[in-house]
Image (cartoon, rainbow, N blue to C red):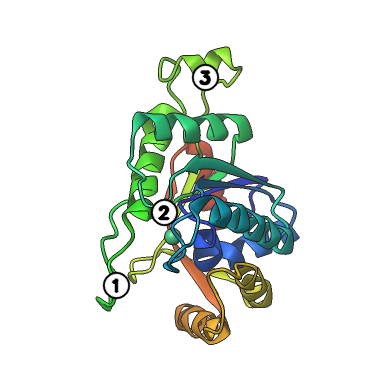
Amino acid sequence: MSFERALVVFAHPDDAEFGSAGTVATWTAAGTEVTYVCVTDGSAGSNEPGAVREELATIREAEQRAACDVLGVKECVFLGWLDGEVEPTLALRKAITRQVRRVRPDVLMAPDPVRWWDEGRQYINHPDHRNVGQACMAVVNPDAPTRPQFAELLDEGFEPFEIPNLWIPAWEGDADTFVDISGAIDKKIEALRCHKSQIRDEPVDEWIRERAKQRGEPHGYEYAESYRTFRLTDEARAEAEEEG
Ligand SMILES: [Zn+2]
């Protein structure tokens, strides 16, 4: 699967690295122009007494930009929502729609809107993730392609746009697409390690390799990331058919 332009929308700095950095590194190496949209400021990413939200937000933005440099991501937009307080509001839908209409991506990567917990029931999903996912679903339809929706965006010069492909990182064994990231796993780990305020002594290399191996092995790859994918236009469906 090759795309000219990809837009990756996520809630917190480091979310995209965990979910899809191997795919992104593989795509950028093949010439795909990748834009990141980080919804929150990541300012709740510390439980240290005395941690200051503003300071953490600055640190986390710098960490995210460093990760983007590792992955060859062209641009990272921060929407500035407060970490921990994301709701799928019209304001958020409009902010994401603005980016979609500006970038006009061949594929939108968005968080799972219905994932409440992990398969092993070892943790409850952060509501920011799910709420960003919900907002993205509304952006796909109706917000981005519908002219009367958020008419102010027309005044800003952003014409409607129909997103051809939607990819959702799938953790639950219901993925339909497995991307071979064997050549990009080192970049994924390097990008994750840029999030120094979040990852200290944890054996992140082991976790990442183990999970990527579980996903890859049944499909003949050393390492893989997995997605549930949607082909939303006739062109996208025709292209998918051609590629078999
Ligand atoms: Zn997160």
Q: Amino acid at mark 3?
A: Leu
Residue 23 vs 106, above or below: the answer is below
Q: Amino acid at mark 2?
A: Pro
Name the image quarter holding residue 67.
bottom right
Residue 123 is tagged as 1
Q: Residue at x 27, y 67 (%)?
A: 124
Residue 232 vs 142, above or below: the answer is below
Measured as percent of width and height from the top left, residue 93 is found at 41, 33
Measured as percent of width and height from the top left, residue 12 is found at 48, 55
Which circle's residue, 1 or 2, is located before the other in the chain?
Answer: 2
Measured as percent of width and height from the top left, residue 77 is found at 61, 42
- 74 left or right, relative to 81: right
- SS state under label 2: loop
Q: Residue at x 67, y 77 (%)?
A: 186
Q: Residue at x 34, y 47 (%)?
A: 131
Q: Are marks 1 and 2 in contact (CB under 8 Å)?
A: no
Of the 4 image quadrants, the one containing the N terminus is bottom right
Which circle's residue, 3 or 2, is located before the other in the chain?
Answer: 2
Q: Is residue 162 in sight in this rendering?
A: no
Reading the image, the residue beneath label 3 is 153
Quadrant hosting ligand 1: bottom left
Residue 72 is tagged as none
Q: Amino acid at mark 1?
A: Tyr
Reading the image, the residue beneath label 2 is 111
- 148 left or right, relative to 238: left
Mark 1 → mark 2, Cα distance in angstroms: 16 Å
Of residues 133 and 236, the one drawn nearer to the viewer in this rendering = 133
- 183 left or right, relative to 151: right
